[in-house]
Amino acid sequence: MLEKLDQIERAALTALEAASDTAALEAWRVAHLGRSAPLMTVLGDLGRLSKEERPAIGKRGNAVKRRLEEAYAAKAERLRQAELERAMRAGALDVTLPGRPVARGRLHPATLGLRDIYTIFADMGFQIYRSREVETDAYNFELLNMPPHHPARDNWDTFYTTNPNVILRTHTSPGQIHAMRQFCPEPIRVILPGMCYRYEQITARADIQFYQVEGLAVGHRVTFTDLKGTLSGFARRLFGQQVRTRFRADHFPFTEPSAEMDVECFVCGGKGCPVCKQTGWLEILGCGMVHPTVLRNGGYDPTVFSGFAFGMGPQRITMLKHRIEDIRYFFQNDMRFLEQF
Ligand code: DAH
């Protein structure tokens, strides 16, 4: 019987050696320490042995049982460690790998163009003044020296609402009146950026909605020289220090005298090319000295105050700078266009 116990022990330990995962270990436990394991049969049958045999066999049987239990526990721990290590190796992170790039948003080319302009005028002491996109006929036309039926109104094809007095602004100039009425009688130096709307045929050069940036300076001795200095300084910052500018006489109802400012074509350097239509010059903005009537409509006494104003289409400037051929690209949300900026 003692020999049989030795054999049971040896067989069990050999089998345990072979168990290589937790499933095999569990099978081993059932086979060698379970209720119908050979060892358990021996221990269960102790009562049938003679009084003389029983103590020795019992003692040996219990020793084998303890031995197997300990071996089982040790093996279980080893397997657990091995499995943990395997799992850690499988899920290992290589912290030296480069990160995956995150797709980032970007600013719209129209916004970028506006911000360039803001920066330059901010450096010259101009504040940004926001005014409404939905205007009355009075602000958009009358107070800017265009009474009803004034022929100059034909230059601004207008979107009307069901109320004929309420329109979408056709330019940012009505903001001049808002700013003057707010600040009068203080001096003013503001730019007024924003969206404008015109009821026009959509083409590569004209959209029904577009940005403008208006400028207004009012003070006691603001002169045409201030206007020229401010705007040519602006052009040099935007297009390069060497760029030349020229002012051509023009007409706007809200300024007197009025002018257009051209910059030397930065594509051909003034020699003439398709971008400047062989003229060597690019038309950038309209400007002038604020008309006395407009000053008065803003609350300023034109015998005491004077001012200059200007208005430009920043998208047109962005188009010239980046050789964008069609203004419709701006608001078509085509990623192939937007991602270039
Ligand atoms: N409002 C004009 C337009 O939409 C642009 C303009 C011209 C604005 C001359 C001005 C100015 O302030 O002085 O075409």
Image (spheres, helix red, strand yellow):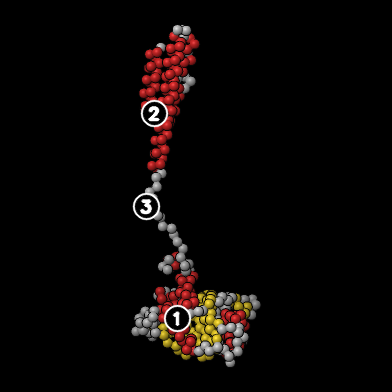
Q: Is residue 327 visible?
A: no
Q: Say which residue label 2 marks.
A: 19
Quarter of the picture containing the N terminus is: top left
Between 231 and 303, the one nearer to me in the picture: 303
Residue type at mark 2?
Ala
Report which quarter residue 267 is drawn in: bottom left
Label 3: element kind: loop
| Identity, as a three-letter code, of the amino acid under mark 1 | Phe
Q: Does the residue tagged 3 have its C-beta within 8 Å of any atom of ligand 1? A: no
Residue at image position (60%, 81%) is 183
> Where is residue 122 drawn, in percent x and y?
49, 77
- Taking the spot 62% from the left edge, 76% from the top edge, the residue there is 161
Identify the residue at horizontal 39%, vertical 84% (top origin): 244
Secondary structure category for the residue under label 2: loop
Helix, strand or loop at mark 1 = helix
For discs 2 and 3, the disc positioned in front in the rendered view: 3
Foreground residue among 323 and 284: 284
- Mark 3 lies on residue: 97
Give the distance between the C-alpha atoms of the residues marked 2 and 3, in whole angstroms. 38 Å
The residue wearing badge 1 is 234
Residue 19, position as x, y percentages in the image: 39, 28
Badge 2 local density, few (<14 within 10 Å), some, or many (20+)? Answer: some
Is residue 263 at all visible to an observer of this figure? yes
At label 3, the amino acid type is Leu
Q: Position of residue 27 (x, y in %)?
A: 43, 26
**Residue in the image at 42% along x and 34% along y:** 80
